[in-house]
Every structure is written in C-alpha cells, then in structure tokens.
Amino acid sequence: MIRIRGAEVYDPARGLDGQMRDVWVDGGRIAPAPEHPQEHQVIDAAGLVLAPAGVELHSHVAGYALNAARRFLASDPEALDQLAPPADVAAGRYLAMGYTTVFDAASSPLYARLTHADLQAMSGVDRGSYTLMGDHRLLLRALKSRDPAELRDTLAWLLRVSGGYAVKLVNPGGGVAWKADRPAPGLDEPIGGLDLTQRGIIQQVVRLVNDLGLPHAVHLHAGRLGQPGNWQPFCETVRALEGQRAHLCHIQFYAYADDGTGGFASAAGQVAACLAPFEQVTCDIGQVLFGPALAVTADTSTLDGLRRRTRRPWISRQVEGEGGANVLPLDYLGRDPASAVQWAAGLELMLCFPDPLRMFLTTDHPNGGPFSAYPQVIEWLMSRAARAEVLERIHPAGRDKSGLAGLEREYSLGEVFAMTSTGPARALGLTDRGHLGVGALADMRCYRPQADIQAMFAQPAWVMRRGRIVCRDGQVLDRPAPGLDRPGGGGGFGPRVGHGAPTARIHRALSEVVTVRPEEYALGAGGERPDYREVPCASAAS
C-alpha cells in the first residue's frame, strides 16, 4: 500500500480544487484510507500539485499516413522528430508530460495492421484507435439499404475486424465525391449515385452508435475544414446532431469567418455560443502552433484544395473501398495573417467556452503542430500576459481579426486538469481514469508549483501509472505493460458479428469492393487480439 501524503489535490470529478489531501493506492488503484494503517510506503507530496494523469483523445501517432508523412521530413531531422516520431518515442513523450492514455484518431480498416503495429510499439501508455467509416463502401451500402439490421451488423463488423475503439467519420461522402471528380458535398447535397446526403449519414450513424451504447460517441470531422466562412455550415452540422451525443474534433479549423476579402477572421465566439446549449456534444480544439506542421487526414477533397492553393507536393493514397490517406507539409508563420488568425481563434474558442469538461486541449498532432507543445498552450490559457506578448509580435490580423486581445479570462489549474484529463476520460467512456475516486486506476501526475507555467507542465516532478512511478523530472524510468482498448466485453456489445449468415453476407459484399480476401481484411480472423482489454458498452442491444 502507498500513501501519497499532503498533496494539493485537483480532481474536477470530485470537486477538489487544490485541497490538501492524502491519496492512498493499493493494487494499482486508488484505495480508501485504511482505519488502521499497516506498514506502507510513503511518498511525500507536501507543497506539490497532484492530479489525474492526462488523457489524449485525438492525435495522429500511428498507421499508414504517419509512415508516409516521414518521407516529407527525411531531410529535416528536427521536424521529423517533432511531427512524426517513432511510435515508441511518441509514447515516451506523452508519458514524460503526464499522459498515460493515448488514442490515434483515424485508422483505415484496410491498413489496420499498420496502425496496430505502431500501437504495439507504444509501450508504457494505454492506447487505441478510431476506425474510419465515413467513405467506406460497405457502410454507405448499408445506409442506402435503409435496413437497420444491415447497418448495425456492418458497423459492428468493421469496428471489430479493425480493432477500433470508436467510429470516425471524416467529411462523410467527401472521399466518394473526390474519386468521382466531383466537389465535396454540402450537408444536404446528394452524394453522387448513392441517394444519400451528409446529414443523413451523420444522423443515422450517430443514432446507431448511441443506441448501441458504444463507450465513445461518433468522432466527427465535419465538412469545409479550414475555409473562411465555414463557421456557419459547421454550426448547421452541430444542429443536425439534434442533441444526440457526439464528439466534434479539431473545431478551431471550423471557427472562421470571411473577412470580406476572402481571408480569415475569427468566428470563435459564434462557434462557442452555438456549441454551449448542446450538453451531449464534446469537442477538441486542434490548436495551431507557429512553425512546421503536417496535414495528415482522410479528407482528400479538402487537402486537394489546400495543396492547390499552397502549390506544395502531397502524398495521396486512395484506399480500396474507403476514402484516402493524405499528407501535406505546412508552415504556420507568425508573419502570415491567416496563421495569426488561426492561432488566435483556437485560444479564443477555449477561453470563450464555459465548460472545460466538454472542450479538450489538442493540437490535432501533427496537423496544428506537435503534441509536445501542450505546456506552451496551457501557459497561454493561464496567462493573459503570455498571450499579449505573442499578439505583439505576430501579424496584426491575430489581434484585429479576433477577439483574443479583449479576453481577460485565465484558466485555473482545475480547469486545465478538467480539459486534459477528466473531460476526455468521460467522453471516451473510460470510467476507471480521469479522476482520483476510490477504485480508479492509480494513474497520476505530480507537479512542483512554479511561476514558469510552461516549464511546470513540461516536466512533472513524477508520473505514476498503475501505482508505480514511471517518470521522474522528465526522465522515463519504467514502462509497465500497456493495454489496448476496444468496445465490447461483459456481453454489452450486442451486435458483434460472429460466424453465420451476417458474416457471410458481409464477406460477399466486401469482395465486390476490395481485392483483399475477406478473411485477410483488416486484422484478419475477425479482428481478435489476445492483448485487448474490452471496455463495456452502455447498451446490450442486439
């Protein structure tokens, strides 16, 4: 048994905001204080800040697209190291920052083996991935059939064979349109030849995922990413969810007004106001950092437009039966008006939105910049002076075309831990982490308070995982065996497709859209992996 003595405890889930507490650990989990303590280990945390470990719910750290991205960076070792490090290096950096759970945000079913090979290498952290489905021919076929059973079985099968934790929709139907040499559809425009609209796809899949009780809601990348004036169609997408549970990712890239000349202005206030009433909707920010970045996305139509405007080379791999895997090198420059507005819009969104348990810190690594910059972003959120210093040295558009300069709010420590731990864990349906209640995993981070906020968050005094200190002062000491999370377990995931008619039907349909044998598709053999830990669903629907 371990006693962490005298810490200043921050636990948003239990309303603790810096109260001095002892925290007890037994068997890798938070334990109640014993009535008659026996022999135990003591960790003196007097004067230190203690909080649940970080939970990353949106990053691109694994799979085919990351491997392709490394080709662009071969001649720039520093950018390669920051934007596309090997999976084991990325895991070590997350651990050193106090994160013990990491999810890759987009995995192609066809290339699932590549994703999971990288995830296997991420020792020391729990990790998982989301399965791309928004342009998958099997899912679109099931949607077109209007047969609820076929849609349920198809979605469940794709999730299972790809080893996915959640359903990812990326600009649904946009990949199909691009392959047909058509523009990406709007929310209510027909997707060529399918008798479907983007609104219909989103609503049906969101409703099904919620009916099944999957632990994480549909993870939605909306249309018109990165375009001036896109805040209005984005808000229409929010309203199209009709109050259903959903997660909207990297929303900074949708918080743009048109400045009247076709350029960028921030619409962060409008987007925050739109999201606020929809309590079942969570989101992550996708904060932009100044410096090199990589666009890594399945949104082929959007990236094709961007590479035409920037006139930079890209890698675009169109996947059999699905959408695409695309990579484009980027630079966000302080002297560039668009970059300045993008940087300001992300911070403005987080500062305008009232609930850090619903809006989470990400950089959409490596799309907005490296995840290793989180300590810098936290400093900007906690210090108006730090934000003002940047506004003074970047293009005036950052100040003049956003509301950031006028915002006085500064995040508290409790709000930082809410948006980096408690909120993401809740959104993922992981009830065993993100808090320090009895029975929770003993995954914690401990900091020395200091005036330099960035330095404080960059190097925790120590990080604990499962009751063992695995990192001290930025140095990883130990990497206990990690876990891979997927939905199911406990009989909760009713529509898991096994042997019999549904599997045979799906295999027949799959053989019409891909050349890979159905038995070898994705992870093969039904997607079963002995090293998975299954997370129960909230529904026993079948």
Image (cartoon, grey):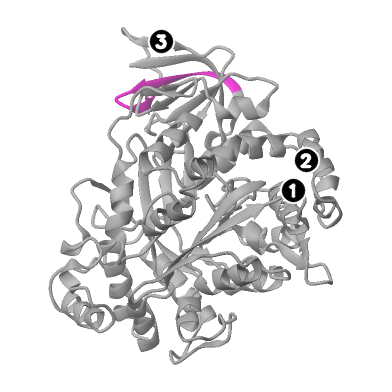
Q: Which residue is mark 3?
A: 42
Query: Can you give x and y, in whole percent of width and height, for residue 360 in the image?
Result: 58, 48
Q: Nearer the viewer, residue 63 or 329?
A: 329
Residue 357 picture location, percent across and down: 58, 46
Q: Which mark is in front, 1 or 3? A: 1
Residue 212 drawn above or below residue 69:
below
Q: Amino acid at mark 1?
A: Gly
For the residue carrying disc 1, how many other residues have a C-alpha within 10 Å: few (<14), some (14-19), or many (20+)?
many
Does the residue at mark 1 contact the one at mark 2 (Cβ under 8 Å)? yes
Q: Which residue is mark 2?
A: 390
Q: Tell me the kind of residue under disc 2.
A: Val
Q: Amino acid at mark 3?
A: Val
Q: Residue furthest top?
A: 39
- Quadrant in which the N terminus appears: top left
| Quadrant assignment, res 471 | top left
Nearer to me, 11 or 391: 391
Pointer 2 local density, CA inside 10 Å: few below 14, some 14–19, many at least 20: some
Vertical position of residue 367 compared to residue 40: above or below: below
* Residue 26 is at least partly visible in this image: yes
What's drawn in magenta, residue-wise? 19-31
Q: Secondary structure at mark 1?
A: loop
Residue 343 within the segment the image draws in magenta: no
Determine whether label 3 and label 2 are within 8 Å by CB. no
Q: Quadrant of the C terminus?
A: bottom left
Horizontally, residue 473 falls left or right of residue 2, namely right
Counting residues from the start of the chain, the first of labels 1 and 2 encountered is 1
Q: Which residue is mark 1?
A: 334
Q: Residue at x 55, y 44 (%)?
A: 370
- Sequence-wise, the earlier of marks 1 and 3 is 3
The part of the image, by quadrant, that contains residue 508 is bottom left
